[in-house]
Structure formats: structure tokens, C-alpha cells
Amino acid sequence: MAAIVFEQVVKNFGSLQVLKGISGHINDGEVVAIIGSSGCGKSTLLRCFNRLETISGGTLIVNGIDLSQPNLSLNQLRQLRTDVGMVFQQFNLFPHMTVLDNLTLAPRKVLKLSEKESGRLARTFLDKVGLLDKANAYPEQLSGGQKQRVAIARSLCMRPKVMLFDEPTSALDPELVGEVLTVMQQLAEEGMTMAVVTHEMQFAREVAHRVLFLNQGQVEEAGPARDVIDTPQSDRLRAFLSRMSFAKTS
Ligand code: ADP
Ligand code: MG
């Protein structure tokens, strides 16, 4: 079963065509790394998956919801927002709320869980990312790596079926990258369906099942992660990989 299917997806911003007929899929339980140079459309594709952007053409189905239709019902939109979690480069935690309150907010508001239930859920996932002792801290008291692990735990509290990561380690000091990648690797090993935009090629190679290499709004190369990264076929991918870092997970 495919969690996400996209066929000939086009995205225009005014006269600028950013996605030029992109096709692919992400199966249930699969980790797909999306790589490519800045501006090639990686974030736009990811944002189409959870309807932060609407597509201009083609077909896109996410967890059975057809995002090609212009008007989704409120129920479908709510379902999509619950099913599909997203983690951004800049964490997006609420600075005036404790870690625990950041985690329980959406479960209380959207899933209508009680304070006790949402608190239990939050502690479970804080423990999972190794930050149970930070429950009462404020975001500014945390390192970048800790903030991103909180952001991941916050997403998990909604029990998503799919997780989207948009350069989750790009804003971090190099020594903090590993702790975030380790949490993501653990999620992958537990069978979470994941689409990960990343410049961490070692992570893509070892943790992703497949890699999509985008170039100027098109899929230039795609396939099993190790094949794509170890034996790139196109000159563009070879040139791209030669510029990338191959840092290890911790
Ligand atoms: P990437 O994530 O691969 O760096 P993006 O998907 O962010 O690339 O952007 C692809 C292209 O789309 C860029 O040229 C960018 O300027 C443009 N773009 C992205 N979002 C918008 C927007 N909301 N309005 C206009 N242009 C946009
Ligand atoms: Mg981007």
C-alpha cells in the first residue's frame, strides 16, 4: 500500500513553474529521502503532501485523501493534519510555553484529549526522544538539537501515519546533528512512513529505503538509497553528491 502517490504533479507560483510534472510514491513503512540543490522544489513538494500548498496539476493522494481536488471538506483537512506530521528546519516551538505544553496543545485542541491523557501521551514521546527531564523547561533553555527532538515528539503526539521532515538538521551546530538523526533513525526502524528532505547523505544512504533526486522541479534520478548514492547515473547527481557532507549518525 502506498501512503503517498503523486503523478505528474505540477506546482506554479504565478508564472514560475516550480514542480514540472513529478511522479513517485511512498509506501507504508517506507523512508524516502528527497535530495537536490537549493531551489529545486524539495520543500514545495513536501508542503504539497500536507496541503500547505495546493497543487496546480496532476494527481496527489495522501493516505487515501485525494489532494488533486480543489476543495477538501473540513473533515478531510483535519484528517490530513492529524495523519501527516511535519518537522521544520526552524523547530517552530511556542516560546512562551513549556515543553510539555507545546506537546499537549494539539492533542487537547484537535484530538480533544483531557489534560491527563495528553500529558501521558506527551511524556511517552518526550521519553522516546530522551527529554523527559525537560518537560517543564522553556524552549529557550534548550539546545537546538533538544528543540528539534521536542518538535519531533510534538509531532508524534498526534499519532501521525506519515512524517515529513524538511531539512530537520540544517539549522543545527554540527555536533548536535547526530542526536536528531538518531531519533529519526529510531523512528524509521519502528516502521514510520517518512519523507525526509536532507543534505545528510550518510543518513539518506543508511536509513532511507529510496532516494529521489530532484533537479529544477523534476525527478532526475530515483531508486534504492545505496544505488543512487553509491553509483549515481547522471552527471548532475554526481556533481551534487561531490559537494555534500557525509557525517555519521551518533
Ligand atoms: P528547495 O526546498 O528545494 O530549496 P523550494 O521548494 O523552497 O526549493 O523552492 C523552489 C522554488 O520555488 C524557488 O525558486 C522558490 O523561490 C520558489 N518558491 C517557493 N515558495 C514560493 C512561494 N510561496 N511563492 C513564490 N515562489 C516560491
Ligand atoms: Mg527547502
Image (cartoon, helix red, strand yellow):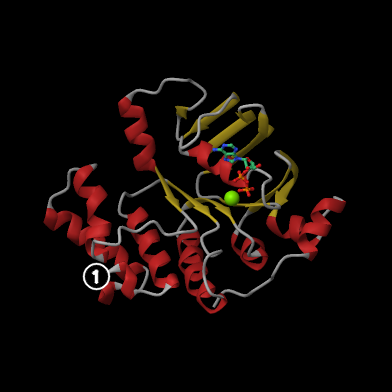
Mark 1 Cα-neighbour bin, 10 Å: few <14, some 14–19, many ≥20? some
171 and 127: which is toward the camera: 171
Label 1 residue SS: loop
Q: Position of residue 40 (x, y in %)?
A: 69, 45
Horizontal side, residue 226 vs residue 157: left or right: right
233 and 218: which is toward the camera: 218
Horizontal side, residue 180 vs residue 33: left or right: left
Single out the residue that lies furthest toward the front. Answer: 14
Q: Position of residue 227 (x, y in %)?
A: 76, 57
Q: Is residue 22 above or below residue 111?
A: above
The residue at the point 23 percent across, 52 percent down is: 105
The residue at the point 32 percent across, 75 percent down is: 141
Horizontal side, residue 194 vs residue 242: left or right: left
- Do we see residue 228 in this rendering? yes
Q: Is residue 67 above or below residue 245?
A: above
Q: State which quadrant residue 156 falls in.
A: bottom left
Q: Position of residue 134 (x, y in %)?
A: 27, 74
Instruction: Name the kind of residue labelled 1 in the image.
Output: Ala
The residue at the point 70 percent across, 52 percent down is: 36
Which residue has dot 1 on it? Answer: 135
Q: State which quadrant residue 139 falls in.
A: bottom left
Q: State which quadrant residue 242 falls in.
A: bottom right
Question: Mark 1 near ligand 2 (CB under 8 Å)?
Answer: no
Q: Position of residue 119 (x, y in %)?
A: 18, 60
Q: Is residue 188 above or below residue 30?
A: below
- Do we see residue 1 in this rendering? no
